[in-house]
Amino acid sequence: MLLSKSFIPILKNNPSEAKIKSHQLMLRVGMIKQASAGIYSWLPLGFKVMKKIEKIVREEQDKIGAQEILMPTIQSSEIWKESGRYDDYGEEMLRIKDRQNREMLYGPTNEEQVTEIFRSSLKSYKSLPQLLYHIQWKFRDEIRPRFGIMRGREFYMKDAYSFDITDEDAFFSYNKFFLSYLRTFKRLSLTAIPMAADTGPIGGNLSHEFIILADTGESKIFTDKRIFDLTNDDTELEKSSLEQMRKRYEKFYSVTDEKFNKVEFEKMVSEENRLITKGIEVGHIFYFGDKYSKAMDTAVDLPGGKKDFVKMGSYGIGVSRLVGAIIEAKYDDENEIMKWPLSVAPYDIALIPMINKNDNSALEKANKINSELIRNNIEAIIDDTDENYSSKIKKMNLIGAPYQIIIGKKSDGDLLEFKEPGGETQNLSLEKIIEIITKQKASN
Ligand code: 5CA
């Protein structure tokens, strides 16, 4: 893609309305455009990143055997009256009336909708477990939408739902999502720590928030530093292996402030391992048993002929919030350098030819390199403007492709000036560069 033809409206300076670095960068490089409070349009650069995040989220859901569906954004109030949440949800729910005067709403979450789908389709324990998910826009009329897409009113969420007959089976489903979340965030190059959390309006008594550390986060956390060293590469998608994995995490005190207990914290965590800080909640999982199935009369036949209400959990990932969360984790705002993880980068590499009025050879060379990159499935953005070196670098450092090739007078031979944003220049052949990027891509 040529920069001159791209829709990347870059601002010279940081927009004054943005208070945190992800919001600043997203407005600065035109990833999003505010439509109204807490509601945004996604422009090409932002949309590309979000779609890549979505793809990883989807792949990791599929890997644990969850099946993708797509439920509507607009729901009928009837099912919410059945569950009892129509009144409980309060002002956060956007309520709409259609032309027949029927009460509708823009879904803030989908427990009721998915329960209604399940109960009208499946009747026997033989169909269980079921893990269903969708990736869809949600609306919550947040009292204080802020920090751009971090706390929006309209936001993009992956929400999954599990259906089982016994608590034991339901915990197995819960643990599958627990593992899939750890894997998902790792592929996004984030360290997200599961923390025991409150369940709020979703309900139930078992819940974990997945939190990444960030000073600008809205969640206060109390944790044992050693939890960051845990790995789960050997965990298998099998009951006991998953149980052991969750136990390894739960051994360490790690909670959000609603669950904080000072006495317990000080008893369980030695002084040098205590960490009290802030973070961003990127995912949240819940087990709530038969809360919805009972209220909505959703039962299946059991082996002996009896019936029982299904046991359910729900599992959310903030797909749009993750765009901001990755920026919070990776953006060096002091030096104005963004480096996207290759797995979600809007472009794999930036080609920066130094062009002057009567010499187009650097641009021609960039185009040739680009053809070779395309053949190798590597996506480049080419700065074909005639700006000077430092302003080109500045722009590309903000756009944040994880690699750069500078094509100047010096690059006559086969070796190219290759670097990471803000990093040291290396002289490498195009072949070698392609090898580095391809290897890195394959490892994700
Ligand atoms: N039904 C459950 C699980 S699917 C649920 O809705 N959980 S939630 O309320 O915790 O939301 C799931 C995730 O969506 C959160 O972890 C967060 O990452 C994201 N999220 C929630 N509210 C917002 C918001 N206002 N703006 C952006 N992302 C949000």
Image: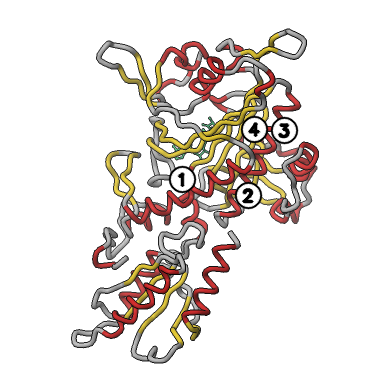
Q: Is residue 334 visible?
A: no
For label 4, the residue is 207
For label 2, the residue is 183
Disc number placed over residue 47 in the picture, else none: none
Q: CA distance from mark 4 to mark 3?
A: 14 Å
Q: CA distance from mark 1 to mark 2?
A: 18 Å
Q: CA distance from mark 2 to mark 3?
A: 17 Å
Disc number placed over residue 321 in the picture, else none: 1
Residue at coordinates 35% horizontally, 56% vertically from top-left? 45
In front: 137, or 131? 131
Report x, y in % for residue 154.
38, 36
Q: Answer left or right for 431 relative to 75.
A: right
Closer to the chain start, of discs 2 and 3, is 3
Residue at coordinates 54% horizontally, 73% vertically from top-left? 436
**How would you rate the neighbour count of disc 2 (Cα within 10 Å): few for under 14, some for 14-19, many for 20 or more?**
many
For label 3, the residue is 172
Report x, y in % for residue 401.
43, 66
Mark 1 Cβ and ligand 1 under 8 Å apart = yes
